[in-house]
Image (cartoon, rainbow, N blue to C red):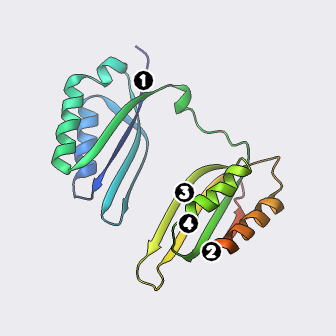
C-alpha cells in the first residue's frame, strides 16, 4: 500500500504533556511525524504536524484512531483536526525568486498584519514563515513582526521596499527588508 499524508492541527491552553501524549497516540497508530511546528503564544499552545502513514488513508483515519484523538482533545482542552493531503501537497516548496526577511516594529494597533501582507500580496510575494509578538510591558504596547518571504524574480526589490516604507509610515511602524543569502539557508 502506498504512503499517505495527513495534516494535523491542534490548539488550546498550554499544559505539560501535550506533545508526549499526542506523539504517543500517533506512534501507536503507525504515523510518522514528517515535519512539525509547535509553539506557545502567551498561555496557548499550537501544533501543526505533517504526518505520513504506510497503511493508507483508511487505516490512518480509522474510527478507533479518531476516538483516541477525541479523548486526547478532551483531556487537554484542545481543538484537534486532521485531514488527508495529497503527495503533491507534501512536496518541498520550491522558491520562485529570492528569500527576504522582513521585520516590522512599532506600537501595537489593529491592522498592521493586513497592511504589511497587503503590500506583499500586491507584489505576488509568498510568505514562507511569519511570527508576530506584542509586548504589554511598554506603553503603548510594542509590536514585532518577522516574515520569511519568497520574492518573485520579476519584482524590483527597490519598489517593494518603497511600498513598505510608505505603508509603514502610514501605520506608524518601521519596516526593514533584508535579503537572505542562499548559502545561509
From this view, report whether residue 64 is shown above or below residue 75: above
**Of helix, strand and loop, which one carries label 3?**
strand
Q: Residue shown at 43%/21% (left/top)?
A: 3
Q: Nearer the viewer, mark 4 or mark 1?
A: 4
Image height check: is 32 above or below 107?
A: above
Q: Foreground residue, 71 or 94?
A: 71
Q: Report which residue position mark 4 lands on.
A: 145
- SS type, badge 1: strand
Which sits earlier in the primary sequence, circle 1 or circle 3? 1
Q: Is residue 183 visible?
A: no
Q: Which residue is at a point 65% across and 53% down the rendered structure image?
A: 149
Q: Disc 2 to disc 1, how far (Cα)?
A: 44 Å
Give the alpha-carbon distance from disc 3 to disc 2, as whole Å: 17 Å
> What residue sits right under mark 2 in the picture?
173
Q: Which residue is mark 3?
A: 130
Q: Position of residue 14 (x, y in %)?
A: 27, 59
The label on residue 4 is 1
Residue 172 horizontal/vertical position (percent): 63, 76
Real-space Cα separation, disc 4 to disc 1, in angstroms: 35 Å
Amino acid at each position: 500500500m502506498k504512503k499517505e499524508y495527513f495534516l494535523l492541527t491542534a490548539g488550546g491552553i498550554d499544559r505539560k504533556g501535550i506533545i508526549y501524549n499526542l506523539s504517543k497516540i500517533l506512534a501507536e497508530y503507525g504515523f510518522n511525524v514528517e515535519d512539525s511546528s509547535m509553539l506557545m503564544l502567551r498561555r496557548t499552545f499550537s501544533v501543526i504536524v505533517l504526518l505520513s502513514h504506510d497503511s493508507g488513508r483508511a487505516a490512518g483515519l480509522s474510527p478507533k484512531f479518531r476516538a483516541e484523538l477525541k479523548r486526547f482533545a478532551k483531556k487537554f482542552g484542545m481543538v484537534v483536526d486532521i485531514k488527508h493531503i495529497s503527495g503533491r501537497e507534501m512536496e518541498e516548496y520550491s522558491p520562485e525568486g529570492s528569500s527576504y526577511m522582513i521585520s516590522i516594529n512599532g506600537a501595537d494597533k489593529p491592522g498592521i498584519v493586513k497592511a504589511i501582507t497587503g503590500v506583499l500580496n500586491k507584489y505576488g510575494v509568498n510568505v514562507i514563515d511569519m511570527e508576530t509578538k506584542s509586548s504589554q510591558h511598554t506603553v503603548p504596547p510594542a509590536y514585532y513582526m518577522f516574515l520569511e518571504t519568497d520574492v518573485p524574480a520579476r519584482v524590483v526589490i527597490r519598489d517593494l521596499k518603497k511600498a513598505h516604507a510608505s505603508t509603514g509610515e502610514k501605520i506608524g511602524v518601521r519596516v526593514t527588508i533584508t535579503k537572505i543569502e542562499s548559502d545561509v539557508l
